[in-house]
Image (tube, coloured by chain):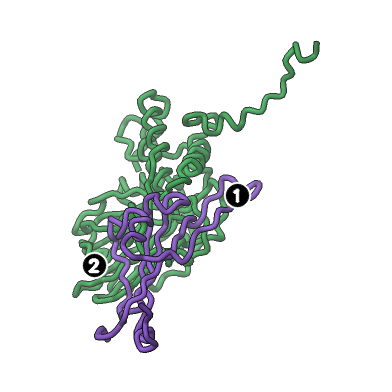
Amino acid sequence: MTASPTDLATLRQKLLVLYAANSSPDTEVVAWSLYDGTSDQTYEAAGEAVPPYATVLDAMRDGWRVIKYPDLRPPSPGQEYDLSYLEFEFVLEKLESIDGKR
Amino acid sequence: MASGNGTSPDLRLTSRDMARFVRDGFLRFDGLVPRDLCAAAMDEIESGRHLRDRGQGGAQFRDIWADPGSALGQAFRLPRVAAIIHSLVGPDPRYDHHAAHLTPAHTRKGANLHQDAEYDVRRNHFDIQISFFPEDTPAESGGTLFLPGSQFRRVYESTTRRYQDVLGQVQAVCDAGTMFFWHTNVWHAARSNQTDRDRYMFKLRLNPTVRQQRLWNTADLDDPDTRTDVAKILSQMIPWHGQRHRIEVMNRIRLWRYLAGDPDFDVALWWTRIENTPDIVYRTQLA
């Protein structure tokens, strides 16, 4: 079934950003963020102890579409022991209609 | 502070405490400051007395709030508090700055996880910050959130704010008189205050003026059980580290070697095996 232009105009994006413990989507989620384009609310970093999904794959099975897959980069010579940002960042989206929500 | 000379108890940190600091980047102590002193400190903070005198960075800490009547001076010079400071930055630290961080009632903070100083590229030396909670701080008042094990992660200040929640994060939910002592590179964030009361967190930053080596109570350092426990603590997995756990452990070992003055200390041969680059030519190779 094809969505009509009117239907498309009501679609908004939700982004779920999941940080995995390793590079594959079936490894456990260790950090997470949510940005909801379907509402006026800002997600409150809530100090939650449990991620919304145990793995990226679980989120995919619940309808989230992966739109960014993390690159793998070898350590730069001399920087093998350096640590920085969370590395395995998967960005997922859902498109939802805002009909009746606003 | 206690001398450790046998005439009074040594109140400094133990080797196990220090290993936890190296692993997590901070230590929490509940009930360090009595409630009446907390109340007096709150009066000083709310009167603005200690908000104005911020121009003394670089002074010796012993000269800050030296008035015996200063409640904040009394709080930070309590024997146990002084002993913990000594353990981390030595006997006569330098005052860097302080701030009475106010989060007014019904203040929304959003995500603001950050590290204070990406420009601090020192590998072993470090400053400490002390977060003093002078009032009861329930979860809904949004006490400071700390991310254990983030002190070795070099990032540009607030660019970590895209991480809204991280597995294992620890929010300060505590009674009045609690202090957190933390490595200044630990990622942290204030949280929203959803209560009807303003919330204060009084922060003090101190710099070492001596080599940060064996400043804690090291009487237990050569005890085999202690060494076993230190190795276990330094090896412990922090779940959000994921695949990078091994490199985190190697950073911990490197810092422990410096702090303990023990360049050969190791856990599970992590450094020993890669430092093993034999140059001796075996005799038969020459035959």
Please rate how many residues cluster around mark 2, counting C-alpha atoms within 10 Å: few if below 14, some from 14 to 19, many from 20: many
Using the rendered image, report if marks 1 and 2 lie on a common chain.
no
The total number of labels drawn is 2
Kindly state the secondary structure of the residue where label 1 is placed.
loop
- Report how far apart the C-alphas of labels 1 and 2 lie in the structure: 43 Å
State the quadrant of the C terminus of chain A. Answer: bottom left
Q: Position of residue B65 (x, y in %)?
A: 37, 61
Q: Amino acid at mark 2?
A: Ser
Q: Which chain is green?
A: B
**Residue that mark 2 sits on:** B141
Residue A74, numbered circle: 1
Q: Position of residue B242 (x, y in %)?
A: 43, 47
Compared to residue B185, the image places residue B106 above or below, namely below
* Residue name at image x 56 percent, y 45 percent: A81
Colour for chain A in the figure: purple
Identify the subunit bearing mark 2. Answer: B
Q: Nearer the viewer, residue A27 or A75?
A: A27
